[in-house]
Image (cartoon, rainbow, N blue to C red):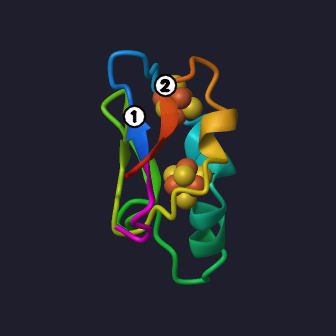
Amino acid sequence: MAKQDKKLVLMDESCIGCGICTTVCPTNLKKQKDINFDVDTEPRAIAVSNGNAFIDYDICVACGICTKNCPVSALIIEVLT
Ligand code: SF4
Ligand code: SF4
């Protein structure tokens, strides 16, 4: 995980798989600017598969931007103690 003091948490039961989180994530956007980026194979901080979002904790920096854009509030930032 990129940051130790906070963590992005997905509530799977709430996620409707709309994919908005994947499009607003600045980490994803930065990766997608790479000319060699392949959306099918390249890991992203957050992506959607089979109707559910999933988080790659090796890439997500827990910035929280996706939590503000999820229409069903399925994403939250958890502060670790
Ligand atoms: S976490 Fe929210 S924004 Fe992301 S796919 Fe699920 S419902 Fe959509
Ligand atoms: S917390 Fe930030 S880096 Fe992690 S998936 Fe959401 S927008 Fe991307």
Task: Give the residue number, with chain letter if any, for mark 1.
Answer: 10
Residue 9 on image: x %, y %: 40, 39
Q: Amino acid at mark 2?
A: Ala
Q: Is mark 2 within 8 Å of ligand 1?
A: yes
The residue that appears at 39% across and 60% down in the rendered structure is 40
The residue that appears at 57% across and 17% down in the rendered structure is 72
Q: Are marks 1 and 2 in contact (CB under 8 Å)?
A: yes
The residue that appears at 66% across and 62% down in the rendered structure is 26
Q: Determine the image quadrant of residue 63.
A: bottom right
Task: Give the residue number, with chain letter if any, for mark 2.
Answer: 74
Report the quarter where the N terminus lies: bottom left
Magenta residues, as a range?
1-7
Residue ranking furthest to the front: 81
Q: Determine the image quadrant of residue 12.
A: top left
Quarter of the rendered structure image containing ligand 2: bottom right
Q: Is residue 58 left or right of residue 29?
A: left
Q: Is mark 1 within 8 Å of ligand 1?
A: yes
Q: Nearer the viewer, residue 17 or 55?
A: 55
Among numbered discs 1 and 2, the one appearing first in the sequence? 1
Residue 51 on image: x %, y %: 37, 27
Magenta span: helix, strand or loop, mainly? loop
Q: What number of labels is visible?
A: 2
- Give the CA separation, mark 1 to mark 2: 6 Å
Against 53, residue 29 (above or below) is: below
